[in-house]
Amino acid sequence: MILVVDMNSLKNLFGRYEFVLSIVAIAEELEKCVVKHYLEVNEKTLNDYDKIILSGSALKNTVTLDQTERFTWLKDCGKPVLGICAGMQTIGLVFGGRLVKCREIGMTEIITLKANPLFSSAFKAYTLHNYALEPSNQFDMLAESAKCVQAIKHKQKDIYGVLFHPEVRNREVIQRFIQAFREPNTIKLTR
Amino acid sequence: MRLGVLFSGGKDSTLALHKAAEKEEVVCLITIVSENKESYMFHTPNIDVTALQAEALGLPLIKKITAGEPEEELKDLEEAIAQAVKDFEIDGVVTGAVESVYQAARIQRICNSLGVWCFNPLWKKNQKALLDEIVAEGFNAIISGVFAYPLDETWLGKQIDPNMIAKLAALSKQYGLSPSGEGGEIETTVLDAPLFKKKIEVLDCEVEAKGNSGVFRIKQVRLTEK
């Protein structure tokens, strides 16, 4: 079962439709999902899930970037994680990276830098961010655009981040993440 | 949060408005009237009906006319949103965008430059599910434009109902049409919806159609009790 973490602030849960449910619709074609707000997630709540996806959020919603202490569970959870946009930025900050101003909005050319299970070669993807991540040396850079790092993977852990929004035009990225870490004998579940 | 809805009077922007009103406070509608029939951003039949829809909803309407030149129309949209910020103190904008990254990216850039939120509650929603929701919520949405084979004038003016959704779903499989018209195959006009305090009655209309392209032009309307 997949945990999809809603990265919108409590005051702006209206963003759940576009940034969270769009991911759930793609992921649930393969496995059952449960959505929890990031304030509801801690080490104990993670026990019920075998994979975690951190959603993106609205451009003006940067609340999780100021609350990285809420995400220290990422360091020891031992589960595959995919962070999308604000999700990737938050992962990067938790592991010692830093954010720099960098605006990309719209379809953007992405170049793969390192072989990985999620994507390959050059492709276009939808971007929506005002900040890019300069990851710490704990991460490999998997992809970049002309302006910034677009995807990362932790060198020792199955923690991935993509700055682009795969739920918009690259749904296969989400599905490949799920398939890459599928438990043997997992069957497709529907609501 | 005070929100303004980018409103064309069709099913998507009206459904987006209803979702916004469930969570936040909708304080105005913003309509862009494009004089360019080829505009990817704004063109839609019966855009003038938005004035009566706004009255039915009890919401003020900011209406901006644009010549519809590709980038100039974005300046006109930015001015309209800026006016909504000034006149109605909106914190954010709501759109009915479902699939178009062309529209969504441009509106996101404008909202970002103005420092307001941008919400797209229908973004990436399954298109048949979107139509089902419109019917389930009690919308009276009619087909006001058809622009693709094998659609023709027999569809114009008809209300979206379960039978029509089944037909559109079948055409989607057979011809690759987008069931809810995301590729510009159909345009719609909403005559009634749950938040309408009165419904719109069409008193006079005309059909202009040729082959697989046609519009249901509403010429005279009035509000009536529900």
Image: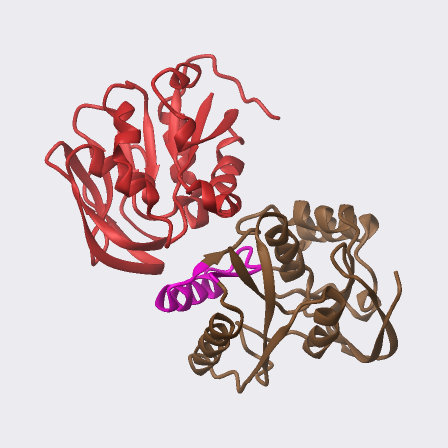
Per the image, is A77 magenta? no
In this rendering, would B179 be left or right of B104? right
Q: How is the image coloured?
A: by chain
Vertical placement of A73 versus B110: above or below? Answer: above
Q: Nearer the viewer, residue B7 or B25?
A: B25
In terms of depth relative to the viewer, which is nearer, B175 or B80? B80
Give me the residue at 39% from left, 23% from top: A51
Which one is nearer the viewer's eye here, B149 or B197? Answer: B197
- Name the colour assigned to chain B in the rendering: brown
Image quadrant occupied by the C terminus of chain A: top right
What percent of the width, then of the height, locates residue A123? Answer: 32, 51
| Hue used for the chain lettered A | red
Q: Quadrant of residue A2?
A: top left
Q: Position of residue B82 (x, y in %)?
A: 45, 74
Q: Is residue A37 above or below residue A182?
A: below
Residue B18: % across, % down: 66, 54
Q: Does residue B166 show up?
A: yes
Number of numbered discs visible in the structure rendering: 0
Q: Position of residue B57 (x, y in %)?
A: 72, 64
| Residue under the point 28% across and 23% down | A73
Q: Is residue B37 left or right of B223 when viewed as pictured? A: left
Q: Is residue B183 visible?
A: no
Q: Quadrant of residue A146?
A: bottom left
Q: Is residue B135 left or right of residue B19?
A: right
